[in-house]
Image (cartoon, grey):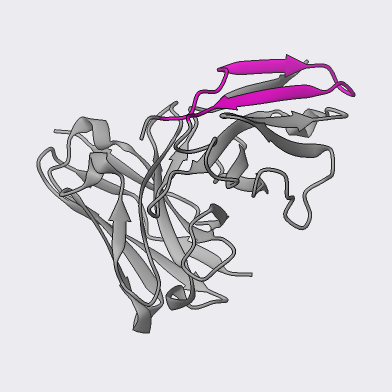
Amino acid sequence: QSALTQPRSVSGSPGQSVTISCSGTGGDIGLYNYVSWYQQHPGKAPQLIIYDVFKRPSGVPDRFSGSKSGNTASLTISGLRAEDEADYFCCSYGGTYSLVFGGGTSLTVL
Amino acid sequence: QVQLVQSGPEVRKPGSSVKVSCKASGGSVSSYSVSWVRQAPGQGLEWMGAIIPKSGRANYAQKFRGRAAITADDSANTVYLSLTSLGSEDTAIYFCARSNGDYVGDINYCDSWGQGTQVSVSS
């Protein structure tokens, strides 16, 4: 399983929206509706913010939304806030009890 | 909500082995899958493998087959990751994470994470 492809960095101003893409293949993102997204602040463990493509765990603001089209998934953060500055990782089920992560995207809030 | 607490930092020499533990509270490790994910310095997350509940069987990313072993001690409510033949490229933070889904044993996403264990490999 090769890692999913994410842009290395994105940026936006407070109040704006940003979208992070995650490109996979027909054997992971394209085949399963099990895409998840994680937020990681420096020195901390990752935190689940989106699962099953678009679902949000309890406590995650609705400013975070997920979607999928073909072999590509996307995370959109609207109404950017300073505390959203972090690294974001996508992940997909890869079949036969396996997961594959993306390389991560660093979000800068200008 | 389940909480996962991992063992402390480890320093090993090249060629040696390491065993990291992940103790659960607020839930039984026999009720859900647990994945191990590592993060090398300044790098992304890398899924290593997972143990499936009740069966006790583990599945590994191809890169780690034959070198990693994930086991569980239900009586201690703890999951372990063993990694052999360590090299400098294994220097990383190792996370355990509860993996969940629609059915028991699914590993569709990771919803609770341990705090991470730093493993450093150096001569």
Which is more toward the observer, B96 or A2? A2
Whether B67 is among the magenta residues is no
The magenta-colored residue range is A3-25
Q: Which quadrant is the C terminus of chain B positioned in?
A: top left
Q: Could you tell whether B111 is left or right of B88 in the image?
A: right
> Which residue appears at 54% of the width and 77% of the height?
B27
Q: Which quadrant is the N terminus of chain B positioned in?
A: bottom right
Marker count (numbered): 0
Which is more toward the observer, B36 or A100? A100
Q: Could you tell whether B100 is left or right of A95 in the image?
A: right
Q: Given the current orientation, which residue lies at the most extreme bottom position?
A: B75
Q: Could you tell whether B96 is left or right of B121 in the image?
A: right
Q: Quadrant of residue B2?
A: bottom right
State whether residue B36 is above or below residue A89.
below
Please provide percent x and percent y for residue A89. 57, 34
Q: Given the current orientation, which residue lies at the most extreme left position?
A: B15
Please provide percent x and percent y for residue B50. 37, 57
Please provide percent x and percent y for residue A99. 44, 45
Which is more toward the observer, B20 or B9? B20
> Which residue appears at 63% of the width and 24% of the height?
A21
Please provide percent x and percent y for residue B98. 50, 61
Q: Quadrant of residue A35?
A: top right
> Which residue appears at 53% of the width and 53% of the height?
B108
